[in-house]
Every structure is written in C-alpha cells, then in structure tokens.
Image (tube, rainbow, N blue to C red):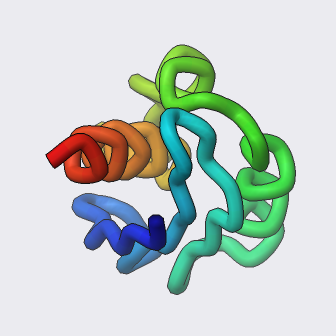
Amino acid sequence: MEYIYKTKGTCSSQIKLNIEGDVVTDVSFTGGCNGNLKAIPALVNGMTVDEIESKLSGITCGNKGTSCGAQLAKACREAFEHQKN
C-alpha cells in the first residue's frame, strides 16, 4: 500500500512509502537535504516498522526537535496503523 505522510518540523515536506504488512519499501522524501534523503531510503528499504522506529525515533536535526529520520519513523507507524483499518 502506498502511503503519503506530511512531515512536521523538517526541511522535507512529505514522505512517500510503500508498506506491506510491517515491511517498508520505496521510501522517498520531497524536499530536504539531498544526500541524507537518498541515504535514509537506501538504509531502511525492507526493514520492519519496529526496526525503523528503534533506529530513527528521537533523532533531532539542529534545534528542530525532530529530523527527517524521526519523521520517517512516525510515517511508518502511521501507515502501519492505517493499513490495519
């Protein structure tokens, strides 16, 4: 299932991902730091929601209180919950 998440508090404005069960693939960001936003999808491709949350939740960027990675963790959890309904 394709899912689009509007980010909050980051340079990127949205995250698009595919989720099947609890496995996340095909992550892409709109906006943000080009290199990081290519690296993050490559690293998390095929991981479960729990794995992504454990690695990325709570990461901050500067003084923002969140980061693109932390927003991805939230997006994955939201997509997983949405998929169940």
Q: Residue at x 55, y 63 (%)?
A: 18
Q: Residue at x 45, y 36 (%)?
A: 60
- Image x and y of residue 56, in percent: 55, 29
Q: Closer to the camera, 38 or 52?
A: 52
Q: Is residue 50 visible?
A: yes
Q: Is residue 63 visible?
A: no
- Image x and y of residue 79, in percent: 33, 51
On screen, 4 above or below 67? below
On screen, 2 above or below 63? below
- Image x and y of residue 49, in percent: 51, 31
- Outermost residue, bottom direction? 31
On screen, 53 above or below 35? above
Q: Residue at x 27, y 72 (%)?
A: 6
Q: Residue at x 61, y 29 (%)?
A: 48
In the rendered image, which quarter is residue 77 located in? top left
Q: Is residue 43 shown left or right of residue 15?
A: right
Q: Is residue 75 shown left or right of residue 36?
A: left
- Image x and y of residue 62, in percent: 47, 45
Q: Closer to the camera, 55 or 78?
A: 78
Number of numbered discs on residues: 0
Q: Closer to the camera, 23 or 66?
A: 23
Q: Is residue 69 shown left or right of residue 8?
A: right
